[in-house]
Amino acid sequence: MKDRLTAVLPWLALAAVWLLGIGAVFALVAQSLTLLMQRRIFGPPDMTVTVCDVPNFCATTGPEEDPLPLDAFSRSTQILAAIPGLILIGMILVAMILGTGVMRRISRGDAFALKTVRALGGASLVLLAGGAVTFALEKWSFERAMAEATTYINTHIASEASITVGMTPQFPSLAMLFGILGLAAWAAFRQGAAMREELDSVI
């Protein structure tokens, strides 16, 4: 019974990762395409897209706290705000596909096979590089959004206005952390593969 549970648990965990990953992909697709196409992809199509659709940012004005229009941002800033989500989509899909391959080979007893080690290293590099690039782009996007919203408010808004800053995105940092852990695992698996080759040559 314990052996069966041990064999099933990794696949249950992998299934949960895929469900969460696909959910995150759909959310990122909706977010990025909304900014790129300047209209809602999911939800009421007549609902106006505003600056509050930019990740981790919102600027409102007046007593009723109406969001600033998306036109408060230049088109280049709108596109820049959408790019990190697109990178995250690719990063999630590639990492999950490579990770699934690693899990399948390990379950077959090929933990130290060359393909397993390469796939683990590839997934780790995707997470590390993608997280670093996304972090830099999100910071740049936020700084541009803040500057342009402030300029728009000072130029066009006579009433009170406020800028609400959301939480700093945690996903890029987590991706880099898991990428570093993955590289550590890759180094261990690579060393194990080298040791197995030495043993095979001796035998």
Image (spheres, rainbow, N blue to C red):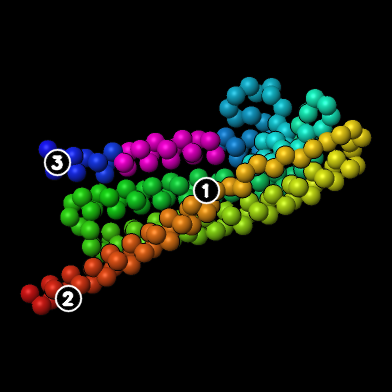
- In the rendered structure, which amino acid carries the disc numbered 1? Phe
- In the rendered structure, which amino acid carries the disc numbered 3? Lys
Going from N to C along the chain, the mark reached first, 1 or 2, is 1
Residue located farthest toward the left when viewing the structure as drawn = 203
The residue indicated by pointer 3 is 2
Instruction: Please name which of the two marks, 1 or 3, marks the residue nearer to the observer.
Output: 3
SS at mark 3 in the image: helix
Quadrant assignment, res 163: top right
Quarter the N terminus occupies: top left
x and y percentages locating residue 110 in the rendered image: 20, 57
Say above or below: 33 vs 76.
Answer: above
Position of residue 114 in the picture relative to residue 123 (left or right):
left
Q: Do the residues labelled 1 and 2 touch (CB within 8 Å)?
A: no
Instruction: Please name which of the two marks, 1 or 2, marks the residue nearer to the observer.
Output: 1
Going from N to C along the chain, the mark reached first, 3 or 2, is 3
Count all numbered tags in the image, as a single digit.
3
Q: Does the magenta stretch include residue 27?
A: yes
Q: Residue at x 27, y 70 (%)?
A: 191
x and y percentages locating residue 19 in the rendered image: 39, 36
Position of residue 46 in the picture relative to residue 104 (left or right):
right
- In the rendered structure, which amino acid carries the disc numbered 2? Glu
- What is the magenta range? 13-28
Q: Residues within 10 Å of mark 3 (few under 14, many from 20)?
A: few
The residue indicated by pointer 2 is 198
- Does residue 71 appear in this view? no
Give the label on residue 20, or none.
Answer: none
User: In 3D space, how far apart are the residues under numbered discs 1 and 2 (Cα atoms)?
Assistant: 40 Å
Query: Is the stretch drawn in magenta largely helix, strand or loop?
Result: helix
Q: Which residue is drawn at 43% across and 61% down?
A: 180
